Amino acid sequence: NFMLTQPHSVSESPGKTVTISCTGSSGSIASNYVQWYQQRPGSAPTTVIYEDNQRPSGVPDRFSGSIDSSSNSASLTISGLKTEDEADYYCQSYDSSTVVFGGGTKLTVL
Amino acid sequence: QVQLVQSGAEVKKPGASVKVSCKASGYTFTSYAVHWVRQAPGQRLEWMGWINAGNGNTKYSQNFQGRVTITRDTSATTAYMELSSLRSEDTAVYYCARWGGYCSGGSCQGYFDYWGQGTLVTVSS
């Protein structure tokens, strides 16, 4: 079964840049689009990146996504960190028409 | 505006079943799929399955095969998720989410653009 692996946690200071990785277990991560969801405590997830690097309307351009086929991984980069960015972030893709989520990364902005 | 409104919290005993509803409004219900995702306390998001609200086709996660049934009522613009043979590990918040994507040739695209507010299901004796 295809799995997506994320670091358990990352932390960075306000104003800095942080990158969260999402590594595919097999095959090519580029064969399906990757999405990124932000989830604050007690709330449903919201999309910050879809189709590898697209931002829904309303998501600031501080959020960007990319794919690195050489490492079979996707990345979410958040620049100019704000305390409000502190949340859990999940990558998501597909495997044979089923949905796969990464394990989630807790971002601490301190 | 698009809204997905889920039914209220449930408390069930082990071995029982639960049925959670997801009432959609603000868009053409049959033009999108509805997925179900759950999250146990302090745990990751876990995908359960989805239904094409137009034709009723479903696909389920292997992790729930045989225990989960997703249906929809187009006249009520509502999707349902029923989980049977409940055990304590099924205690979680259950979310429905709208999906405007599609799958072709084994690859899929699309993302969850609207989510319900979540329904807490507690399984306890």
Image (cartoon, coloured by chain):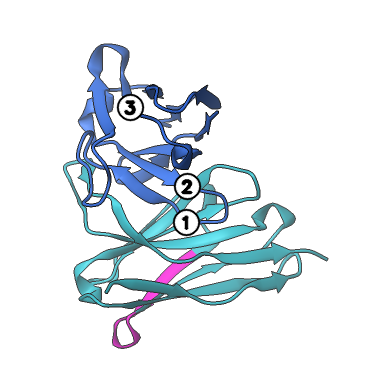
Chain colours: A blue, B cyan
Closer to the N terminus: mark 1 or mark 3? 1
Amino acid tagged 2 = Gln
Give the CA distance from mark 2 to mark 3. 16 Å
Could you say which is closer to the camera, residue A83 or residue A29? Answer: A83
Amino acid tagged 3 = Thr
Which picture quadrant has residue B49? bottom left
Quick one: SS at disc 3? strand
Could you say which is closer to the camera, residue B84 or residue B112? Answer: B112
Chain of the residue that carries numbered disc 2 in the rendered image: A
Residue B26 percent across, percent down from the top left: 26, 77
Within 10 Å of disc 1 (Cα), the crowding (few <14, some 14-19, many 20+) is many
Span highlighted in magenta in the image: B69-77
Closer to the N terminus: mark 2 or mark 3? 2
Quick one: SS at disc 2? strand
Residue B84 seen anywhere in this rendered image of the structure? no
Give the residue number, with chain letter if any, for mark 1.
A44
Which picture quadrant has residue B85? bottom right
Which of pointers 1 and 3 indicates the residue nearer the eye? 3
For image coordinates 28% across by 71% down, the residue present is B53
Instruction: Please tell me how many numbered marks the rendered image carries.
Output: 3
**Pointer 1 and pointer 3 on the same chain:** yes
Give the residue number, with chain letter if any, for mark 3.
A77
**Pointer 2 and pointer 3 on the same chain:** yes
